[in-house]
Amino acid sequence: MTSQHAQTPPSPAIEVRDLTVAYRSLVALRSVSLTVPWGQVYGLIGTNGSGKSTLFKSIMGILRPNSGTVLINGGSAAIARRRSLISYVPQSEDVDWSFPLSVREVVMMGRYGSLNWLRTPRRKDRTAVSDALEKVGMADFADRQIGQLSGGQRKRVFVARALAQGAAIVLLDEPFTGVDKTSEATISFLLRRLAAEGKTILVSTHDLHSLPGLCDAAALINKTVLLHGTPAEVLKPDNLALAFGANPFAARHGATTGGATFVHAPLAG
């Protein structure tokens, strides 16, 4: 007699459960729940100040929430970081642009977790850096001082740093803000390619035109997750009004969400 055992489904790439984060008396996020599966580009849509960056820092374990849980592949953010499972490209980098650091050296920082105690790059580290620069179209700038690049080129370099790390989950906070069209197209193409390879990309933006061709799914956020669905569903005018400043009672009183899943009414204050 044979026995059959049900297989345990794989853990989501990112799972946020009832997360609340406050800075002293100011609530930045309230009761946020979000599940991001593997192999997708998932968008977070919201205005500046809606809590997108706070959510990213909470997922990375940079901020400690007041309550709630964040799981990365079923484990803690600390474990995910130690295993180089997750990488993060913030909206802006605290960098001294005059410091004599080359593009190659910046991208090599993504390999620090795998280097020996002397921080001596090996062949596989140099290969990972070269491959990452090639993917973002910056191989010809490898020896250029980082401060000599345009805003879009710098953003591509920091994306390359995340790629060099080898993470299966990549968080990008407003990657298209202040970048040129070439950099936006290069990054968008790369993110779709990474998702096709099974990686998970969580990208925040308030730039709506890029979502339909980029994201598989998206969530509207305004201090909490208002609703989630496909880009076509989420981008319906009635839904966008929830996040971008219309009547906060619209969804409570019967307005359609056009197929998106409604989660919370917008929060005041």
Image (cartoon, grey):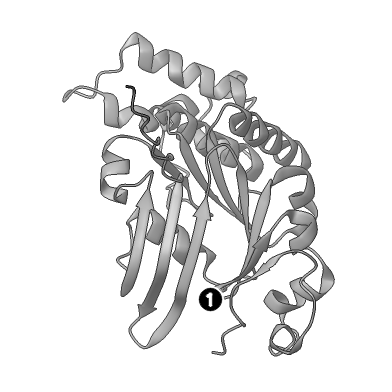
Q: Residue drawn at (75%, 85%), measured in percent from left and top?
A: 246
Q: Residue drawn at (41%, 44%), measured in percent from left and top?
A: 11
Q: Quadrant of residue 166?
A: top left
The amino acid sitting under disc 1 is Lys
Residue that carries the numbered disc 1 in the rendered image: 223
| Quadrant the C terminus occupies | bottom right
Residue 180 showing in the rendered view: no
Q: Position of residue 197 (x, y in %)?
A: 58, 26
Q: Position of residue 19 (x, y in %)?
A: 40, 70
Query: Which residue in the rendered view is the most extreme toward the top?
Result: 123
Tell me if 229 is positioned left or right of 235 in this view: left
| Quadrant the N terminus occupies | top left
In terms of depth relative to the viewer, which is nearer, 170 or 98? 170
Q: Residue drawn at (57%, 89%), measured in percent from left and top?
A: 268
Q: Position of residue 159 (x, y in %)?
A: 54, 37
Q: Is residue 130 above or below residue 229?
A: above
Q: Position of residue 80 (x, y in %)?
A: 32, 42
Q: Is residue 55 above or below residue 213?
A: below
In terms of depth relative to the viewer, which is nearer, 75 or 180? 75
Q: For numbered disc 1, what is the local secondary structure?
A: loop
Pointer 1 local density, CA inside 10 Å: few below 14, some 14–19, many at least 20: many
Q: Residue drawn at (82%, 67%), measured in percent from left and top?
A: 236
Query: Which residue in the rendered view is the most extreme toward the front?
Result: 1
